[in-house]
Image: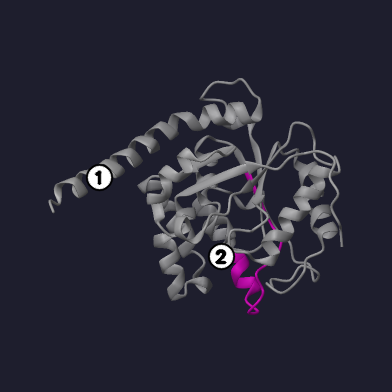
Amino acid sequence: MSVYPVVFIVLSYFVWIKCIYYRHRSSLVKSLNRFMNVLTSRDTVGADIRALVVTAHPDDECMFFAPTIIRLVELKASVHLLCLSEGNYYNQGAQRKQELLNSCAVLGIPDSRITIVDHKKLPDDPKAEWSVSLVSSLIVKHMREHSFNMVLTFDGSGVSGHANHTAIHKAVSYLASTGQVPNDCRLLSLVTVGLFRKYISFLELPFSWLLPCSLRCFLGSQGYRQAKDAMYCHRTQLLWFRYLYITMSRYMFINTFQMIPQGPKNLKIY
Protein backbone atom coordinates (compact mmCIF):
# COMPACT_ATOMS: atom_id res chain seq x y z
CA MET A 1 0.00 0.00 0.00
CA SER A 2 1.36 3.42 -0.97
CA VAL A 3 2.08 5.84 1.83
CA TYR A 4 1.40 8.86 -0.38
CA PRO A 5 -2.38 8.98 0.23
CA VAL A 6 -1.76 8.87 3.98
CA VAL A 7 0.84 11.62 3.76
CA PHE A 8 -1.52 13.69 1.62
CA ILE A 9 -4.37 13.28 4.13
CA VAL A 10 -2.14 14.22 7.07
CA LEU A 11 -0.72 17.27 5.32
CA SER A 12 -4.19 18.34 4.23
CA TYR A 13 -5.40 18.09 7.82
CA PHE A 14 -2.58 20.34 9.05
CA VAL A 15 -3.22 22.85 6.26
CA TRP A 16 -6.91 22.85 7.24
CA ILE A 17 -5.96 23.58 10.85
CA LYS A 18 -3.73 26.45 9.72
CA CYS A 19 -6.50 27.92 7.57
CA ILE A 20 -9.01 27.66 10.42
CA TYR A 21 -6.64 29.44 12.77
CA TYR A 22 -6.06 32.38 10.42
CA ARG A 23 -9.75 32.64 9.63
CA HIS A 24 -10.51 32.62 13.36
CA ARG A 25 -8.25 35.60 13.95
CA SER A 26 -10.55 37.81 11.87
CA SER A 27 -13.80 36.11 12.84
CA LEU A 28 -13.30 36.44 16.61
CA VAL A 29 -14.07 40.17 16.57
CA LYS A 30 -17.18 39.58 14.45
CA SER A 31 -18.30 36.83 16.83
CA LEU A 32 -17.86 39.12 19.80
CA ASN A 33 -19.78 41.88 18.06
CA ARG A 34 -22.66 39.51 17.37
CA PHE A 35 -22.55 37.97 20.80
CA MET A 36 -22.33 41.24 22.71
CA ASN A 37 -24.76 43.05 20.39
CA VAL A 38 -22.36 45.91 19.87
CA LEU A 39 -21.59 47.58 16.54
CA THR A 40 -18.04 48.79 16.86
CA SER A 41 -14.90 48.61 14.77
CA ARG A 42 -12.19 45.99 15.07
CA ASP A 43 -9.94 48.47 16.89
CA THR A 44 -12.43 49.37 19.60
CA VAL A 45 -14.49 46.23 20.26
CA GLY A 46 -12.16 45.06 23.01
CA ALA A 47 -12.56 48.26 24.98
CA ASP A 48 -16.31 47.60 25.14
CA ILE A 49 -15.82 44.26 26.90
CA ARG A 50 -15.59 44.04 30.67
CA ALA A 51 -15.09 40.34 31.29
CA LEU A 52 -15.07 38.37 34.52
CA VAL A 53 -13.56 34.89 34.59
CA VAL A 54 -14.80 32.92 37.61
CA THR A 55 -12.67 29.98 38.74
CA ALA A 56 -12.45 27.69 41.74
CA HIS A 57 -8.70 27.31 42.31
CA PRO A 58 -5.35 28.86 41.45
CA ASP A 59 -4.18 27.31 38.13
CA ASP A 60 -7.74 27.04 36.71
CA GLU A 61 -7.15 30.31 34.89
CA CYS A 62 -4.32 28.88 32.77
CA MET A 63 -5.25 25.18 32.70
CA PHE A 64 -8.71 25.86 31.29
CA PHE A 65 -9.23 29.53 30.32
CA ALA A 66 -5.84 30.67 28.95
CA PRO A 67 -6.92 30.87 25.26
CA THR A 68 -9.84 33.13 26.15
CA ILE A 69 -7.94 35.36 28.56
CA ILE A 70 -5.05 35.82 26.13
CA ARG A 71 -7.35 36.59 23.21
CA LEU A 72 -9.45 39.09 25.16
CA VAL A 73 -6.35 40.84 26.51
CA GLU A 74 -5.01 41.07 22.94
CA LEU A 75 -8.24 42.86 22.01
CA LYS A 76 -7.64 45.26 24.94
CA ALA A 77 -10.68 44.04 26.84
CA SER A 78 -10.83 44.66 30.58
CA VAL A 79 -10.38 41.14 31.98
CA HIS A 80 -10.87 40.38 35.67
CA LEU A 81 -10.48 37.15 37.62
CA LEU A 82 -12.52 35.96 40.60
CA CYS A 83 -10.96 32.86 42.18
CA LEU A 84 -13.17 31.38 44.89
CA SER A 85 -10.46 29.63 46.93
CA GLU A 86 -6.75 29.89 47.68
CA GLY A 87 -6.19 26.24 46.74
CA ASN A 88 -5.30 25.27 50.29
CA TYR A 89 -5.98 21.51 49.95
CA TYR A 90 -2.36 20.68 50.86
CA ASN A 91 -1.92 23.70 53.16
CA GLN A 92 -0.15 25.66 50.43
CA GLY A 93 -2.67 28.48 50.20
CA ALA A 94 -0.26 31.39 50.61
CA GLN A 95 2.15 29.99 48.03
CA ARG A 96 -0.59 29.16 45.56
CA LYS A 97 -2.03 32.65 45.91
CA GLN A 98 1.30 34.15 44.83
CA GLU A 99 1.54 31.62 42.00
CA LEU A 100 -1.86 32.79 40.77
CA LEU A 101 -0.75 36.41 40.76
CA ASN A 102 2.39 35.45 38.81
CA SER A 103 0.37 33.40 36.33
CA CYS A 104 -2.10 36.22 35.73
CA ALA A 105 0.78 38.64 35.13
CA VAL A 106 1.94 36.35 32.30
CA LEU A 107 -1.60 36.15 30.90
CA GLY A 108 -2.01 39.92 31.04
CA ILE A 109 -4.28 40.41 34.07
CA PRO A 110 -2.89 42.95 36.57
CA ASP A 111 -3.10 42.36 40.33
CA SER A 112 -5.71 45.11 40.67
CA ARG A 113 -8.17 43.01 38.63
CA ILE A 114 -7.70 39.80 40.64
CA THR A 115 -9.87 38.81 43.60
CA ILE A 116 -9.05 35.68 45.60
CA VAL A 117 -11.65 34.50 48.09
CA ASP A 118 -10.61 32.79 51.32
CA HIS A 119 -13.81 31.51 52.92
CA LYS A 120 -14.01 28.63 55.38
CA LYS A 121 -17.19 27.36 53.68
CA LEU A 122 -15.45 27.25 50.30
CA PRO A 123 -12.56 24.81 50.83
CA ASP A 124 -10.43 23.47 48.00
CA ASP A 125 -11.78 19.95 48.24
CA PRO A 126 -13.30 17.75 45.50
CA LYS A 127 -15.52 16.16 48.14
CA ALA A 128 -16.85 19.45 49.50
CA GLU A 129 -20.29 20.65 48.42
CA TRP A 130 -20.04 24.38 48.04
CA SER A 131 -23.17 26.31 48.91
CA VAL A 132 -24.75 27.58 45.70
CA SER A 133 -26.37 30.47 47.54
CA LEU A 134 -23.01 31.56 49.01
CA VAL A 135 -21.17 31.26 45.70
CA SER A 136 -23.90 33.10 43.81
CA SER A 137 -23.92 35.93 46.36
CA LEU A 138 -20.14 36.40 46.00
CA ILE A 139 -20.35 36.40 42.21
CA VAL A 140 -23.29 38.79 41.91
CA LYS A 141 -21.69 41.20 44.38
CA HIS A 142 -18.55 41.25 42.25
CA MET A 143 -20.59 41.70 39.07
CA ARG A 144 -22.45 44.70 40.48
CA GLU A 145 -19.29 46.35 41.80
CA HIS A 146 -17.58 46.27 38.40
CA SER A 147 -20.50 46.33 35.89
CA PHE A 148 -19.27 43.37 33.85
CA ASN A 149 -20.96 42.62 30.53
CA MET A 150 -19.42 39.16 30.13
CA VAL A 151 -18.98 36.38 32.70
CA LEU A 152 -17.12 33.19 31.81
CA THR A 153 -16.94 30.07 33.94
CA PHE A 154 -17.29 26.28 33.88
CA ASP A 155 -20.20 24.30 32.48
CA GLY A 156 -22.19 21.69 34.39
CA SER A 157 -19.44 19.08 33.97
CA GLY A 158 -16.67 21.42 35.08
CA VAL A 159 -14.17 20.13 32.42
CA SER A 160 -12.67 17.72 34.96
CA GLY A 161 -15.83 16.91 36.92
CA HIS A 162 -14.48 18.67 40.03
CA ALA A 163 -17.32 19.43 42.45
CA ASN A 164 -16.04 22.95 43.10
CA HIS A 165 -16.13 23.70 39.35
CA THR A 166 -19.69 22.48 38.93
CA ALA A 167 -20.82 24.44 42.00
CA ILE A 168 -19.81 27.67 40.23
CA HIS A 169 -21.87 26.72 37.19
CA LYS A 170 -24.89 26.04 39.40
CA ALA A 171 -24.44 29.40 41.08
CA VAL A 172 -24.20 31.34 37.80
CA SER A 173 -27.18 29.42 36.39
CA TYR A 174 -29.14 30.35 39.49
CA LEU A 175 -28.33 34.03 39.01
CA ALA A 176 -29.44 33.76 35.40
CA SER A 177 -32.69 31.99 36.24
CA THR A 178 -33.66 34.43 38.99
CA GLY A 179 -33.17 37.62 36.99
CA GLN A 180 -30.19 38.89 38.97
CA VAL A 181 -27.99 39.35 35.90
CA PRO A 182 -28.16 42.70 34.02
CA ASN A 183 -29.68 42.52 30.55
CA ASP A 184 -26.45 43.64 28.91
CA CYS A 185 -24.37 40.93 30.61
CA ARG A 186 -23.68 37.68 28.73
CA LEU A 187 -23.01 34.47 30.67
CA LEU A 188 -20.79 31.83 29.08
CA SER A 189 -19.88 28.31 30.17
CA LEU A 190 -16.72 26.54 29.02
CA VAL A 191 -17.65 23.43 27.05
CA THR A 192 -16.50 20.11 28.49
CA VAL A 193 -15.37 17.65 25.81
CA GLY A 194 -14.75 13.91 25.94
CA LEU A 195 -11.35 12.39 26.71
CA PHE A 196 -10.41 11.80 23.08
CA ARG A 197 -11.00 15.40 22.04
CA LYS A 198 -9.56 16.70 25.31
CA TYR A 199 -6.16 15.09 24.80
CA ILE A 200 -5.37 15.47 21.09
CA SER A 201 -3.93 18.94 21.60
CA PHE A 202 -4.33 21.42 18.71
CA LEU A 203 -5.46 18.59 16.42
CA GLU A 204 -8.88 19.03 17.99
CA LEU A 205 -9.27 22.42 16.31
CA PRO A 206 -11.45 21.27 13.34
CA PHE A 207 -13.94 19.65 15.72
CA SER A 208 -14.34 22.90 17.66
CA TRP A 209 -14.61 24.88 14.41
CA LEU A 210 -17.36 22.70 12.95
CA LEU A 211 -19.46 22.07 16.07
CA PRO A 212 -21.90 24.84 17.06
CA CYS A 213 -21.07 27.07 20.02
CA SER A 214 -21.57 30.66 21.14
CA LEU A 215 -17.92 31.71 21.25
CA ARG A 216 -14.56 30.20 20.19
CA CYS A 217 -11.05 31.23 21.19
CA PHE A 218 -7.98 29.61 19.63
CA LEU A 219 -4.26 30.09 20.24
CA GLY A 220 -1.35 29.77 17.85
CA SER A 221 2.20 28.82 18.78
CA GLN A 222 3.02 32.18 20.38
CA GLY A 223 -0.17 32.19 22.47
CA TYR A 224 0.46 28.60 23.50
CA ARG A 225 3.93 29.50 24.78
CA GLN A 226 2.33 32.27 26.83
CA ALA A 227 -0.24 29.85 28.28
CA LYS A 228 2.52 27.35 29.03
CA ASP A 229 4.62 30.00 30.80
CA ALA A 230 1.58 30.90 32.91
CA MET A 231 1.14 27.25 33.89
CA TYR A 232 4.82 27.02 34.84
CA CYS A 233 4.20 29.74 37.43
CA HIS A 234 2.22 27.16 39.44
CA ARG A 235 5.30 25.31 40.65
CA THR A 236 3.48 23.51 43.46
CA GLN A 237 1.25 21.86 40.86
CA LEU A 238 3.90 20.73 38.38
CA LEU A 239 3.72 17.00 38.93
CA TRP A 240 4.61 14.65 36.05
CA PHE A 241 1.05 14.40 34.74
CA ARG A 242 0.77 18.19 34.57
CA TYR A 243 3.50 18.24 31.95
CA LEU A 244 1.48 15.76 29.90
CA TYR A 245 -1.57 18.00 30.32
CA ILE A 246 0.35 21.07 29.17
CA THR A 247 1.44 19.23 26.03
CA MET A 248 -1.69 17.25 25.20
CA SER A 249 -4.73 19.17 26.45
CA ARG A 250 -6.81 21.07 23.89
CA TYR A 251 -7.69 23.56 26.66
CA MET A 252 -4.15 24.94 26.36
CA PHE A 253 -5.00 25.87 22.75
CA ILE A 254 -8.78 25.95 22.37
CA ASN A 255 -11.80 27.22 24.31
CA THR A 256 -15.40 26.90 23.19
CA PHE A 257 -18.32 28.35 25.11
CA GLN A 258 -22.08 28.02 25.24
CA MET A 259 -24.37 30.77 26.44
CA ILE A 260 -26.06 30.21 29.79
CA PRO A 261 -29.72 31.03 29.18
CA GLN A 262 -31.39 33.69 31.28
CA GLY A 263 -34.98 33.01 32.21
CA PRO A 264 -37.30 31.37 34.77
CA LYS A 265 -36.14 27.97 35.86
CA ASN A 266 -36.61 25.76 38.89
CA LEU A 267 -33.31 25.22 40.66
CA LYS A 268 -32.83 23.93 44.18
CA ILE A 269 -30.50 25.97 46.37
CA TYR A 270 -28.72 24.55 49.40
The percent coordinates of residue 95 (x first, y second) are 60, 72
* Tag in front: 1 or 2: 1
The percent coordinates of residue 240 (x first, y second) are 43, 75
Q: Which residue is mark 2?
A: 99
Q: Nearer the viewer, residue 126 or 233?
A: 126
The percent coordinates of residue 39 (x first, y second) are 61, 20
Instruction: Identify the disc placed on residue 9.
Output: 1
Q: Which contiguous range is marked in magenta?
A: 79-98
Q: Identify the residue shown where x is 25% and y is 45%.
A: 9
Give the structural element (helix, strand or loop) at label 2.
helix
Q: Is residue 227 above or below residue 127?
A: above
Asked if residue 53 shows in the view, the reply is no
Quarter of image, res 248: bottom left
Q: Is residue 194 above or below residue 72?
A: below
**Residue type pointed to by label 1:** Ile
Give the structural element (helix, strand or loop) at label 1.
helix
Q: Identify the residue shown where x is 79% and y is 43%.
A: 176
Quarter holding the N terminus?
bottom left
Judge the density around disc 2: few (<14), some (14-19), many (≥20) Cα neighbours within 10 Å.
Answer: many
**Residue type pointed to by label 2:** Glu
Q: Dots 1 and 2: beta carbons under 8 Å?
A: no
